[in-house]
Image (cartoon, helix red, strand yellow):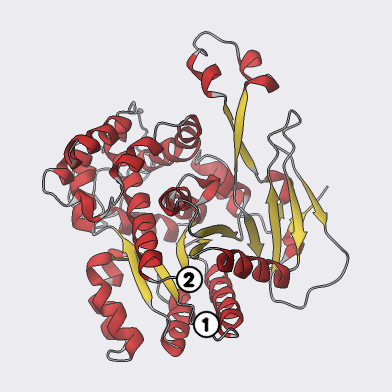
Amino acid sequence: MNKKQLFSLALCTASITTCNFVHAFGTNGASNRRDAISSAFKQGSATAAAILLGGSDVSAADGSPSTTAFSAFEVRPDASKSLNPSLQLVKPESLLKKLVIDVNKHQGGAIWLGEHHNSEADHLLQADIIRSIAAMRSGNNKNKPISIGLEQVQIQFQHFLDDYVAGNISEKTMLAGVEWQTRWAWSFDGYRPIFELAREQKIPLIALNVDAEDLAEVEQGGLPALNAKDRLFRYVIDPVGFAEFAKAEEFSEYVNYVIQPSYNLHLQMGLLRTTMSGKQLEEPMSFRNFFSGRILWDEAMASAASTWCANNPDGLMFGLVGADHVKFGKGINGRFERLAKGKYSSATLILNPTGTDSRPAGNMNTMIEESSREKLYAQRLTLQLRYLDEGISKKSVGATEKELRAPQTTGGVLAFSDYIVVNNAGDYIVG
């Protein structure tokens, strides 16, 4: 079976039914979909813009105070009959040490720092975590490479990142070279501390994202459009695994909970008549093409990270990616773990999440109301997704909701994240 035949297995996974839409928001003349999302944020729908891209308890491990600038919680999923996940408060120092130990037990790994692109607080957390772990790893005489993987930059612009870190070009020249303003659109101001840290410590910056021109091909014609131009395998280094990944019952639950609602919201906001590269579409993008673009996006970033780890033994990549791409474990992080085959560690930290981050993208008014709250109630976080046993799922046609909720039908759960990291634990209110 050749590569194209293998990939035909993956193409069939993209044939999911398209939903109807309500055109509620215009794009205000934005040149591409990313600009339109940024425009929506500026109009006040901050939570919706960030997304576009059961009750639980919080318990403290001990009562001793922490001296670090952030607080951390471990997500403890529960697949037992009680289905009662929880958050466990952990000392930041203990979390960082555990992450380093886990990487050292493997041949390298990745730490995914799930961000909200418009949040300077998230980016300061990213810089703090990277700086702290880099210092811990440098204490060992053994050469252990570190890199920072960037969803924000497309792979065709890698040489500009290399020149910036080497000190050969200025920040202004680098930003112009990677076409930050048009290709990413979110303000660079929040990211500046991370880039300056990378340049100061000579930490390689690695472009992870799909080139917009290639993503546009998929958004118009699905994966076959890119495959026909022999560019698909720039991003998919494991076509068989890529196809098999989409067949599991847990991935179906992930699609229903994360990707399908995201598509619906894009439609509601009127954002699917333009590709990421700015090409106008005669009709709103189909779910098949939206889904194909999303899984290519995630697979490409996982593949780039895996390739870097393979080329840098004992190396650690910090992945700066949207929280939406790593929540519930079947986005970039799950794909990286599949490619790693146990050789590399993988840990996901979602930064400053709100209840909206852990629920399906939904009604605009509800999300704007959620984003206006000053405090985050921990019990509003959905800490896990339950999926059905595969055997049960295949026989579920005609089954009642009560029957499908029976404990014996549970196949497993998907945790929201490995860890949640927040600037202020006081924002997590219990009771």
Q: Nearer the viewer, residue 144 or 299?
A: 144
Identify which residue is drawn at 36% across, 32% down. Answer: 21
Which residue corresponds to the image point at 47% horizontal and 53% vertical from the top-left? 333
Badge 2 marks a residue whose secondary structure is: loop
> Taking 115 as reference, is 244 above or below it?
above
Give x and y (percent) for residue 27.
30, 51
Q: Residue at x 66, y 15 (%)?
A: 402
- The image position of residue 138, as x and y in percent, is 56, 84
Q: Amino acid at mark 2?
A: Asp
Q: CA distance from mark 2 to mark 1?
A: 10 Å
Q: Is residue 218 visible?
A: yes
**Which callout, 2 or 1, points at the residue further toward the start of the chain?**
1
Give residue 213's quadrant in the image.
bottom left
Q: Are marks 2 and 1 in contact (CB under 8 Å)?
A: yes
The disc label shown at residue 393, or none: none
Which is nearer the eye, 352 or 396? 396
Query: What kind of residue is marked 1?
Result: Lys
Picture layout, residue 15 above or below residue 128 = above
**Which residue is most to the right?**
63
Label 2 Cα neighbours within 10 Å, binned few <14 / some 14-19 / many ≥20: many
Judging by the rendered image, the residue that carries numbered circle 2 is 314
| Residue furthest left as drawn | 229
Q: Residue at x 24, y 38 (%)?
A: 7
Say which mark, if any, is on residue 142. 1
